[in-house]
Every structure is written in C-alpha cells, then in structure tokens.
Image (cartoon, rainbow, N blue to C red):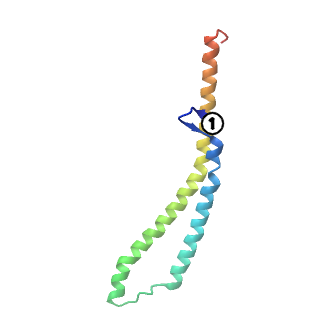
Amino acid sequence: MAGNDDFGIDPEQVKAQAPKFAELASQLTTGLAALRNGLAEHGESWGNDEFGDRFAQNYVHKADEALEGIEGAVLLFQFLEKGVGLTADTFEGFDQEFKDALTKVTRNLDGKG
C-alpha cells in the first residue's frame, strides 16, 4: 500500500469496485430497454391536433436526449469497470517502483549498493 497516514490507496479495494460498476451498467441497460419498450408501446399517444403537435415539439427531442444520457451513463459505468482495474494495477506498479528506488538509495547510502 502506497501512502502514509494522510493518504493511501489500497489497489485491491479499488479493484473491488469493478463489479459494482458492471452491475450499475447492467441495471441501467435493463432499465433503458424497458423504458424504450414502454415508450414504443404507447407510440405517439399525444395526438395529431394542435396541442399534440406542441407537446411533441417540446417532448420528443427532450425524451431522445434523456435516452442518450442514459446510454452515456451505461458507457461511463462500463468504462469505469475496466478503468478501476487498470488504475489499481498502475498504482501497484508505481508503488513497487518507488519501493525499489528507496531500497536502492538506502543500499547506496549504507555502502551496500
């Protein structure tokens, strides 16, 4: 574990978050599919009169934006799922390199390098 009393990162705890992000992505994907199916079942139920047209002008693009936002959240959680493992591995590598450098400096100072 790198750090001191003020700061530290436990790579295993970081890696342990990956399944949580995967689960969030899965739940959002399932919910998005259900939402799309529900919207498709109702179709354009606001009608073709003046009020329906006004509603559609305000609603359709905002609904599409909301669906795209949910899709973006799915992609974000999928990215985070993969990223936390990479981040933890990278941090472990930096931590080991730092420890190795300190060991080398200490050996040199002790005249054993």
Task: Tell me if mark 1 has few (under 14), some (14-19) or many (20+) residues whose alpha carbon lies within 10 angstroms of its own.
Answer: some
Q: How many marks?
A: 1
Mark 1 residue element: helix
Query: The residue under label 1 is which amino acid type?
Result: Glu
Horizontal side of residue 32 vs 54, given as left or right: right
Identify the residue at image location x=44%, y=72%: 64
Q: Position of residue 36 (x, y in %)?
A: 53, 75
| Along the line of sight, the residue nearer the viewer: 98 or 52 | 98
Q: Is residue 108 above or below residue 81?
A: above
For this orientation, the residue located farthest to the top is 111
Q: Is residue 18 above or below residue 27?
A: above
Q: Position of residue 109 (x, y in %)?
A: 60, 11
Identify the residue at image location x=43%, y=68%: 65
Q: Quadrant of the C terminus?
A: top right
Residue at numbered disc 1: 92
Q: Quadrant of the N terminus?
A: top right
For this orientation, the residue located farthest to the front is 5
Q: Quadrant of residue 8?
A: top right
Q: Is residue 69 above or below residue 12?
A: below
Q: Position of residue 93 (x, y in %)?
A: 62, 34
Identify the residue at image location x=45%, y=87%: 45
Horizontal side of residue 63 vs 99, given as left or right: left
Q: Quadrant of residue 88?
A: top right
Identify the residue at image location x=60%, y=44%: 86
